[in-house]
């Protein structure tokens, strides 16, 4: 809770063996009040709904809990799956994980479900489901990330959360992965180890050069009264000003860098 993460996911799914699901629920229930005192948003990742009893049992149990910032729903493949969750948890924001080919094809309906706060990519499961084998840089998943970013924007959702970097000791790879997330318009990244958090925050932050450019753009725009103007031989108009303001927003507010 003191790691600097912007939110913490309490997991009931892949990290918990089937025989220990009940014990995991009990542990979360007992710890939740104390964890909430740290003022860090808490999310529970439930088991997949419709894949046995574990997901349904999670929902009945969660309905009695308070203090949650959201529920992460794994392996979502339809808006109907989210409706099942929503009927049990009607006031809780949902974070669907897109982890399969079926989820990819249903992205538009999933993103329009009324409780969805933002989408998240589970690219490891996605590769396992689809048989895709990625090279360095994961260009094979470009269409997945692009589509997630586009439906997030079209549905007016918060920017999507990218998947994990599994090599917890490779700082250079982590930075490159975050920069790729930024290029696709993502607003956050899942972590699997606290040591990744500082590197992710640093990589999400604008560079000194970008900040200097952004401040000069905003100043030039203000001086021109909103009319198009030249700066360093390039035209500055409304879309350029918006980009500059996004750099400044990322620099000034930690909530614009979601690491969970």
Image (spheres, rainbow, N blue to C red):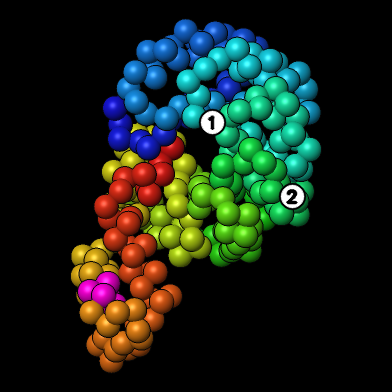
Q: Which residue occupies the foreground of this view, 81 or 214?
A: 214
Q: Position of residue 16 (x, y in %)?
A: 58, 21
> Residue 177's image quarter?
bottom left
- In the figure, 140 relative to 58: above or below? below
> Residue 225's image quarter?
bottom left
Q: Position of residue 154 (x, y in %)?
A: 62, 60
Residue 70 numbered tag: 1
Q: Which residue occupies the foreground of this view, 101 or 154?
A: 154
> Residue 45's image quarter?
top right
Q: Is residue 14 visible?
A: no
Q: Quadrant of the N terminus?
A: top left
Callout 1: few (<14), some (14-19), or many (20+) C-alpha neighbours within 10 Å? many
What segment is highlighted magenta in the picture? 217-222
Residue at far front of view: 225
Q: Position of residue 5 (x, y in %)?
A: 35, 36
Residue 85 numbered tag: none
Q: Position of residue 181 (x, y in %)?
A: 46, 57
The residue labelled by disc 2 is 109
């Amino acid at each position: 809770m003191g790691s600097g993460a912007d939110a913490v996911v309490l997991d009931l799914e892949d990290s918990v063996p089937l025989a220990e699901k009940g014990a995991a629920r009990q542990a979360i229930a007992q710890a939740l009040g104390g964890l909430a005192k740290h003022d860090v948003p808490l999310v529970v990742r439930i088991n997949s709904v419709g894949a046995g009893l574990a997901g349904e049992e999670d929902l009945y149990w969660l309905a009695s809990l308070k203090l949650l910032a959201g529920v992460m729903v794994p392996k979502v493949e339809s808006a109907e799956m989210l409706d099942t969750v929503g009927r049990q948890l009607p006031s809780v924001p949902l974070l669907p994980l897109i982890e399969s080919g079926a989820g990819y094809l249903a992205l538009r309906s999933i993103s329009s479900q009324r409780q969805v706060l933002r989408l998240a990519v589970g690219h490891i499961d996605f590769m396992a489901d689809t048989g895709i084998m990625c090279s360095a840089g994961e260009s094979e998943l470009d269409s997945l990330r692009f589509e997630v970013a586009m439906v997030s924007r079209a549905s007016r959702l918060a920017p999507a959360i990218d998947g994990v970097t599994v090599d917890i000791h490779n700082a250079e790879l982590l930075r490159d992965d975050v920069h790729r997330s930024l290029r696709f318009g993502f607003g956050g990244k899942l972590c699997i180890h606290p040591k990744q958090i500082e590197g992710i925050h640093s990589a999400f932050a604008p560079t000194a050069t970008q900040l200097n450019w952004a401040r000069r753009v905003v100043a030039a725009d203000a001086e021109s009264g909103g009319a198009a103007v030249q700066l360093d031989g390039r035209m500055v108009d409304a879309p350029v000003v918006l980009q500059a303001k996004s750099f400044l927003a990322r620099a000034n507010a930690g909530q614009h860098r979601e690491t969970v």
